[in-house]
Amino acid sequence: MEGQYKFDEVARSERYFTSSILYHLLVNDGFKGLKIIFINIFGEECCRNLNNDFEVVSELDPLRDGSVYQPKIKKLFKKNKRVAVPDLFLRWSDLILILEAKFFTNPKEEDLENQISLQKKAIDLVKGETAYTKCTINYALLTVLEKSENDFSDSNIILLTWDHLLEWMQISIPQSVDVSYSFSVLKKAIQRAKDELQNNTQVSYKKISSFNELLNGLPDLVEQGFIYVGFSGWEENRASISLQELKNRSHYRVSKKKWSDNWITIDRLLHRYFEVKGLL
């Protein structure tokens, strides 16, 4: 974009779109946006007699947040640390939808599935101490580019696109000034993301099976130019990444090119490793 521009025309943070723009559409006018999403996912019959008990929580950390007030969760948090942080936790009566949203990034299906798996683990760890023991919980991926069910081993993951959500909500939500603005921001951002992602689908990388293999192979990787590491959510979660998380990742991806904001230079990963080892 050349010349003068507005910040909402170039914003790229997934948190901005989920916690600000989408959040507003969900709760506006008596939770109209949330209702229409639930009706489309759970079915109209299932939602027909639900009471007006709603809950919308962005950037939920199930263990950390609960540990402040609940002794049992505090013990779990000390043991497990931050397992996963879903972008949105949505509840209508006894129905729950947990959303993991992507916008200007297009992670591999295996990485997305692993992220959902960790979210399920985090919720399952605390569920017995929450008010949700009798709730129906579904997990969904919200992406710009459409995903295929055939690429996921877990058939229970609901696959949504931002286009789906906009189409559903535009039908039902009254077009007030604030709502129209929110839709406009999302539409323009979706088109920007599509243009970028569709031109950047051929991501090439080398797969490293473990953190130890990454450490041992560092001299050769750097010599060959593989100086970038794929790490989703690095900017948001860097300060809380533990030694266990670094060592227990299913694999690492290294590349000669920074494909998106989720690709960081190897030295940043090493710096965090030195920090959690107490070497800095």
Image: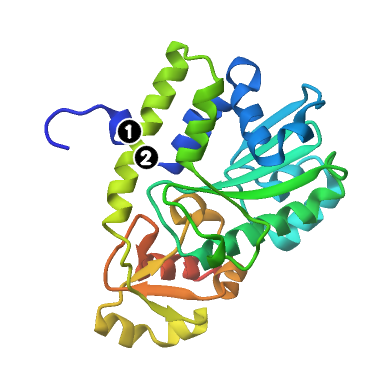
In x, y percent, where is residue 10? 29, 36
In x, y percent, where is residue 196? 28, 50
Q: At 82% from the left edge and 49% from the top edge, which residue is drawn?
A: 127
In x, y percent, where is residue 124? 78, 55
Indicate the amino acid at tag 1. Lys
Instruction: State left or right for residue 133 relative to residue 83.
Output: right
Do residues under tags 2 and 1 come within 8 Å of each other at their CB atoms?
A: yes
Residue 24 in sight here: no
Colour convention of the picture: rainbow
Q: At 79% from the left edge and 44% from the top edge, which residue is drawn?
A: 136
The quarter of the picture where the N terminus appears is: top left
Which of 243/1 is in front? 1
Indicate the amino acid at tag 2. Ile
Instruction: State left or right for residue 4 relative to residue 137.
Output: left
Residue labelled with disc 1: 188
> Seen from this angle, which residue lies furthest top?
176
Q: At 37% from the left edge and 25% from the top edge, which residue is drawn?
A: 184
